[in-house]
Image (tube, rainbow, N blue to C red):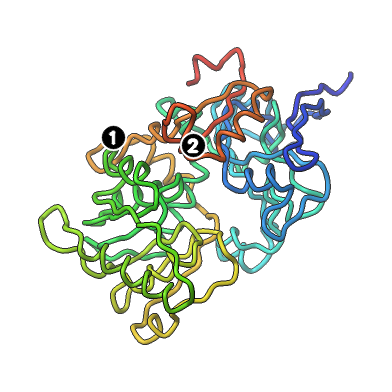
Amino acid sequence: MATPSFKALVLHGAKDLRIQNRQLPKPSHNELQVAVRTTGLCGSDLHYYSHYRNGDIAVKEPMSLGHESAGVVTDVGSAIRNFKIGDKVAMEVGLPCEECERCKQGRYNICKGMNFRSSAKAFPHAQGTLQERINHPAKWCHKLPNNVSLELGALLEPLSVAIHSNRRAQLPPQSTVLVFGAGAVGLLVAAIAKIDGSATVVIADIDHGRVEFAVQHGFAHKGYTVPLKRGNDIDEHLTIAKDTAAAIGGLSRTDGSRVGEVDVVFECTGVPSCVQAAIYATRPGGRVMLIGMGTPIQTLPISAAALREIDLVGSFRYANTYAKGIEVVSRKGPNTPDFSKLFTHRFCGLEEADEAFEMAGKTKDANGQLILKVVIELPGEDRARLL
């Protein structure tokens, strides 16, 4: 019997996407075969698409992009008992070694042997999810309840980044939180802080539209639009950062009191001026969470952090987060925003992928509408029923 083939979107160079047929065998004993239905586009996907590299990680062979995905089980490995054909699943696409010390500690996100779909760090590359079907270990597939759509299932991947960073932040009760960056990840980070009981969540960005969206749709309590200022030297850069921190501290909370210095800053941009301002905005003994993958080498006011015992804490991807993510997107409540509002632009089929990637690289579309999360939806007979 011939091995069936399915279409896959494959990147061969910068902005060189091609639809190709790939052979896909039956899933092994511990795998599921999943028909991918929804994939959200991430910043790393855009870097690979635009430059055929992500920072210093260059693509070494044709590679499928996509890692924020959900789909429908179409075949089940012989050893699998807890999934069946037709189940909706979200795929956790990082495959750790499961044997090293970090994995045994439950911190598999920083496993040195991690093989992450759509990342060129490992070779051969783990092919991404912008394919009609893939085989994936059942251990890393998460069943979606009936009230969670495939789009929200795809959102669980970036939502996991937010959940993981909030856990590492160890937020005190009724904390005051500042988030730099109101893109999809920043909005999700703010939302989780709010859901987890922070009394005041402030979000800051240079894009007023994104800040306004965050507050209007309940992702944050307060917003601040950062003025576009550029210094000529490090002294001017730090003065601007101090001014930004002071302006945010001068905002009023919902009860009318000043925000002041915050307990935790989630830095989601990687932009040096934001990391600098984050340090100045944090109270003594507070934390700055480093989430944004921006400028790799930066000049920071380290003494301002050290003398006030401000912890600078890295947060990379996620571990053990999907169960909470599913619970979060399933709930309704006054502190829970409508996460579906993040999906601003949808494209249907692999044939529209170039247009989708070009859209995802912008902040507004031709009609002036805000662009937050762009998704590519793949058609299927079951799609209308499962959305």
Task: Please provide percent x and percent y for residue 157.
Answer: 52, 44
Q: Distance between the residues labelled 2 and 1?
A: 21 Å
Q: What residue type is labelled 2?
A: Lys
Q: Is mark 1 on a helix, strand or loop?
A: loop
Q: Mark 2 points at which residue?
A: 373
Which image quarter is the N terminus in? Answer: top right
The mark that comes first in sequence, 2 or 1, is: 1
> Residue shown at 57%/38% (left/top)?
41
In the rendered image, the residue lying farthest to the front is 232
Q: In this view, does 209 lie above or below 197?
A: above
Callout 1: few (<14), some (14-19), or many (20+) C-alpha neighbours within 10 Å?
A: few
Seen from the viewer's position, the closer of residues 160 and 99 is 160
Task: Please provide percent x and percent y for residue 230.
Answer: 44, 64
Task: Please provide percent x and percent y for residue 88.
Answer: 54, 27
Q: What element carries label 2?
A: strand
Instruction: Verify CB contact (< 8 Å) between mark 2 and mark 1.
Output: no
Callout 2: few (<14), some (14-19), or many (20+) C-alpha neighbours within 10 Å?
A: many
Q: What residue type is labelled 1?
A: Lys
* Left or right of residue 152: residue 304: left
In the rendered image, the residue lying farthest to the right is 1
Question: Can you tell which mark lies on residue 332?
Answer: 1
In the rendered image, the residue lying farthest to the top is 381
Task: Please provide percent x and percent y for residue 121.
Answer: 73, 56
> Residue shown at 47%/65% (left/top)?
290
